[in-house]
Amino acid sequence: MGNIVINPREIEAKVVEAIQTCYDPEIPVNIYELGLIYGVTVDPDGSVKVQMTLTSPNCPSAAELPAEVEQKVRAIPGVSRATVEIVFDPPWEPWRMSEAARLQLGM
């Protein structure tokens, strides 16, 4: 059997799609549109690293959201490993939200 060829761009697009199904329980907008995802890195071996933040360090979803993101990313065909890193630098600000998220929240 030959090696499976991983297309990092294709995997990254699928990662973004998966993340767009994750919602902050307090805000009816997915965490990608909220601007909580700071970066997605896909290595040629299929390992994925997601850098994300939370709306605040005291966010009640601090344990749930990263675990949900990791689980959904790990379920993508071609992903060999998923790691979610929580960062608070730079801190999240409302301007990081997409225009669609701001419209949805009436901002």
Image: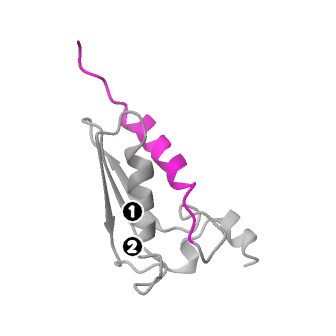
- In front of the other: 3 or 33: 3
What is the x, y in percent for residue 77? 41, 34
**45 or 38: nearer the eye?**
45
Q: Residue furthest bottom?
A: 58
Secondary structure at numbered mark 1: helix
Percent across and percent down for residue 89 are: 34, 78
User: Where on the picture, by quarter, is residue 22?
Assistant: bottom right
Hey, what amino acid is under mark 2?
A: Ala
Q: Is residue 102 left or right of residue 55?
A: right
Taking the spot 49% from the left edge, 79% from the top edge, the residue there is 55
66 up-or-down from 58: above or below = above
Where is the N terminus found, in terms of image quarters? Answer: top left
**How would you rate the neighbour count of disc 1 (Cα within 10 Å): few for under 14, some for 14-19, many for 20 or more?**
some
Identity of the residue drawn at 47% across and 76% down: 61
Cα distance between the residues tagged 1 and 2: 7 Å
At mark 2, the secondary structure is: loop
Within the magenta stretch, is there residue 3?
A: yes
Contact (Cβ within 8 Å) of mark 1 with mark 2: yes
Picture layout, residue 77 above or below residue 1: below
Give the residues drawn in magenta, as a range.
1-24
The quadrant where residue 39 appears: bottom left
Q: Which mark is residue 105?
A: none
Relative side of 62 to 20, left or right: left
Q: Amino acid at mark 1?
A: Ala
Q: Residue 78: x, y in percent?
A: 36, 33
Q: Residue at x 49, y 41 (%)?
A: 14
Q: How many marks?
A: 2
Name the residue beneath numbered marker 2.
Answer: 63
Residue on which disc 1 sits: 67
Location of residue 101 (image quadrant): bottom right
Q: Nearer the viewer, residue 66 or 43?
A: 66
Say which quadrant the C terminus sits in.
bottom right
